[in-house]
Amino acid sequence: MTFTLINPSTGVAFQEVSRATVDEVDAAIARAVQAQRSWAALPPVARADALRAFARAVEDHVEELAALEVRNSGHPISSARWEASHVAQVLNFYAGAPERLSGQQIPVAGGLDVTFHEPYGVVGIIVPWNFPMTIASWGFAPALAAGNAVVLKPAELTPLTALRLGELALAAGLPDGVFQVVTGQGSVVGERFVSHPGVRKVVFTGSTSVGIGVAAGCAAALKPVTLELGGKSANVVFADADLEKAAAAAPGAVFDNAGQDCCARSRILVERSVLDRFMELLEPAVAAWRVGDPSLDETEMGPLISAGHRDTVSSFLDGADVAFRGSAPGGDGFWFAPTVVLAAPGDRIAQEEIFGPVVAVLPFDDEADAIRLANDTAYGLAGSVWTENLGRAVRVTRGVKSGVLSVNSHSSVRYWTPFGGMKASGLGRELGPDAAEHFTETKNVFFATDAS
Ligand code: NAD
C-alpha cells in the first residue's frame, strides 16, 4: 500500500510512498530498542561527533533538501533553504549536549548521593506537514543527544525530507537503527508509537484534537508525552506603536508558509483610535506580499498544502466581512489569496485555527481590553505586542497566556530558546538549553560510605 504525493503548486501527482503496516512499525521499534543500548553506552564525545557529522551532511545537502520541500510542500525556496540550514544548526546545538548532561552530588548523611540523567530508550516522534524538517529536528536532535534512539513518523502528505534525513544520518555514520523514519498513517504508525511498550516517550506535534487522543493513549500506557498543538495567536498593536513598522511586519506574521504556521498571528488586535490608520497601512503591505511559484527566490508565499485544506480555509470566508485581499496565481495549484477580514470576538474566524492566509482584525479599547481579547481563545501558543512603552510591553506580555511572545517583532523560533504552548496549544517545551534533559529520566543513587 502506498500514498500518492501531489505537488501543491501544480496539483500533479509525482511520487508514491509506502504506508507501513503495524508489523513493520513493530520491527522498526525492535531495531531501535536494540540499537539504543550501544548508542547510549558510547562515550558522550562519540555521540557528539556523530551528531556533528550528521549536521555536516545536512549542510552539504541544503539545496537538495530545499528542492524536495518546494516540490512536496510548496514552500518558497528561500524558506526551504532556511529550514534545511536550521536542521543542521539544531543538530550542531544539541551535539553540545551529551558532554553537558551532568547530574548532581547531593549532601546526605552516611554516604554519597548522586543523580544521573538516563535516556528513556526509544522516543517516538510524530510530526505534521507544515514544517516537515524543522519540527522533526526539534525532537530528534535533543533526543539522540541524550542517548535515545528515535523512530520518526512524518505526515502522510510530506514524507520526503524526513526520508532523506534518515539516509543522511546513516551515511554520516549514525549506527543502524538509532534514527529511523517510518512513513504511514497516523492511525497506524502514530498510534503504534503510543501503544507499543518499546517506545518510552512520545513527542507529538499536530492538531489539538489529535493531540488529546495521543495524550490519552500515553496516559493509559504511562509514558510521558510532549504536545505541540494548534494556535490562534494575537498580534496586539497599541496606538503608541510605530504603526508603519507594525503594519509592514503584519503580513509576514501571519502569511508566512501561507498561514500554515502554528505561530501565525492570525488575529490582529488594534487600539480603536488607530484602527483606520493601521488598515490604510496594512492594505498596501498585503497587496505587495509576493504569492507565486515557490521555486523563485523572490516568492514569499506558495500554495496551500492540498485541495482539501484549501476547501477548509475557504469555508472560513463564508459570511465573513472581507476588508481586502492580496493576489494569487490561477492554475491547478492550491492557491489562496492572502485575506484580511474584520471580525467580532465571538466569531468562528476569531476563535478557531484556520491554518491558512486569513487574518481577523479586531479593535480594542485599552490595555486591559487588549489582554482580555488576546486571551479570549482556547489557545496560547505565540503572540506579538507592538508598543513604544516599556512598562506596557512588560505588563501585556506577562498578562497574555502564551508560551512564546515577542515585542515589536514576530519572531517565535530560535533553537537556543524554549518553545511551546499553554492552554490548548500544548504541554511541555522543545528547544532551548534544557531540551536534551527533557529526554532523560533522573536516577538517584545512594552509596553508603560509613565504615561500620
Ligand atoms: P494532525 O494532527 O492531523 O497530524 C499530525 C501528525 O499526527 C501526522 O503525522 C498524522 O499522521 C499524525 N496522526 C494522525 N492521527 C493520529 C493518531 N490517531 N495517533 C497518532 N498520530 C496521529 O495535524 P496536521 O494537520 O498534520 O498539522 C497541522 C496542525 O499542527 C495545526 O493544528 C498546527 O497548529 C499544529 N502544529 C503545531 C506546532 C507547534 O509547535 N505547536 C507546530 C506545527 C504545527
Image (tube, helix red, strand yellow):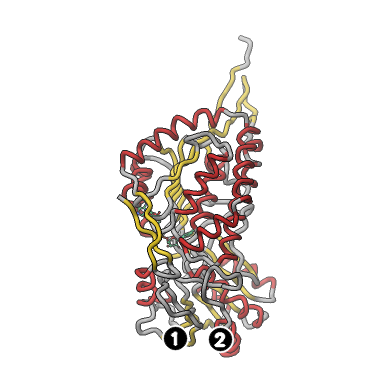
- Mark 2 falls on what kind of element? helix
The quarter of the rendering in which ligand 1 is drawn is bottom left
Q: At which x and y percent is residue 2?
A: 33, 52
| Residue drawn at 46 percent across, 71 percent down | 303
Disc sitting over residue 322 in the figure: 1
| Mark 1 CB near ligand 1 (8 Å cut) | no
- The residue that disc 2 covers is 283
Residue at the (43%, 82%) spot, across then down? 344
- Residue drawn at (56%, 74%) of the image: 235
Task: Identify which residue, 25 or 298, lies in the foreground.
Answer: 298
**Local crowd at mark 1 within 10 Å, few (<14), some, or many (≥20)?**
some
Disc assigned to residue 219: none
Q: Amino acid at mark 1?
A: Val
Report x, y in % for residue 444.
55, 29
What crowding class fits label 2: few (fewer than 14 Cα within 10 Å), some (14-19), or many (20 or more)?
Answer: some
Residue at the farthest top position: 452
Q: Residue 366's spot in the image, x, y percent?
A: 57, 80
Which image quadrant is residue 171 in?
top right
- Type of amino acid under label 2: Glu
**Residue 372 visible in this rendered orientation of the protein:** no
